[in-house]
Amino acid sequence: MAAEHDIYRSLRLNRIIVLTTLVVSTLISLGALVFAYSTYKYHMNHALVLSANGEIMPLKWVERKEVADIQLKDHLTKWFDSYYTFDQSNMITQREKGLWLISGEEGKKLEEFYESKGWYNDIIRKSLGQKSNIIDGSIETSGYDSPYNFKCTVAITVYPLTRQDLADTYHMTVLGQLSFVEPNWPLNIHGLLIHNYRESPWIKIEKP
């Protein structure tokens, strides 16, 4: 009977140990998840910037809304510098870089639009190049939190590669929204994506 009592006592003790281990493991796992989520939210709502006196170090975390306007404008600049600036030698790679900065659905619609116009074929067939430039002071952003609305005017210059002096310049107005996502270095350093992208027809600017 003493041996049987010891066996039951050992079983109860083992059961308590197992249950305690499971509870502690569950609490640790939940704590880790909460910590990971809190860290993710913190990084999504904060950004690293240089100190106010211009020193490279130390870096400090600031509320993202304090630097959001700078990030939005830089993201738009990178978008137009890549997707709308190319020639026949780098057309594919430039467009691919740009597509990292816009939502997949919007990027697909834009690709289909220019392909249906035969624009990319014209670039190759006519040996053309094009470059883009946001008109100074035309970027307008609004909104206190993501998604932010934006509007800007962009100049597109199209030129023969052999005669760049024969360039034609077009203006278009662009509207859309920008939302913060997880950054992807170096493809999307600000962690922003363009949504609801709309551009007006290109208007040719007559030469003086």
Image (tube, rainbow, N blue to C red):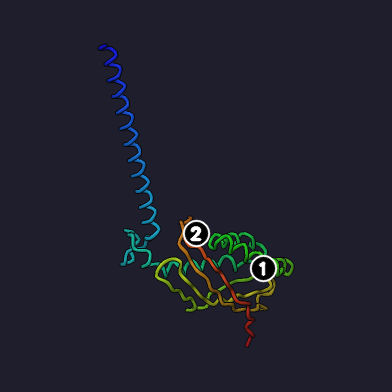
Q: Secondary structure at mark 1?
A: helix
Tell how many labels: 2
* Direction right: furthest residue: 125
Extreme-left residue of the structure: 2
Residue pictured at 33% horizontal, 29% vertical: 18
Closer to us: 81 or 13: 13
Image quarter for residue 108?
A: bottom right
Q: Quadrant of the C terminus?
A: bottom right
**Residue 84 location in percent, x, y?**
60, 68
Rendered location of residue 65, percent (x, y): 37, 67
* Left or right for 58, reference 137: left
Residue 187 visible to an observer of this rendering = yes
Q: Is residue 10 above or below residue 102?
A: above
Q: Which residue is mark 2?
A: 188
Figure check: 93 above or below 7: below
User: Front-most of 158 and 47?
Assistant: 47
Residue at 62%, 65% in the rendered image = 109
Image vertical order of residue 151 relative to residue 1, above or below: below
Residue 135 drawn at (x, y percent): 52, 78
Residue 127 is at least partly visible in this image: no
Give the amino acid at mark 2: Asn
Q: CA distance from mark 1 to mark 2?
A: 23 Å
Mark 1 or mark 2: whose residue is earlier in sequence: 1
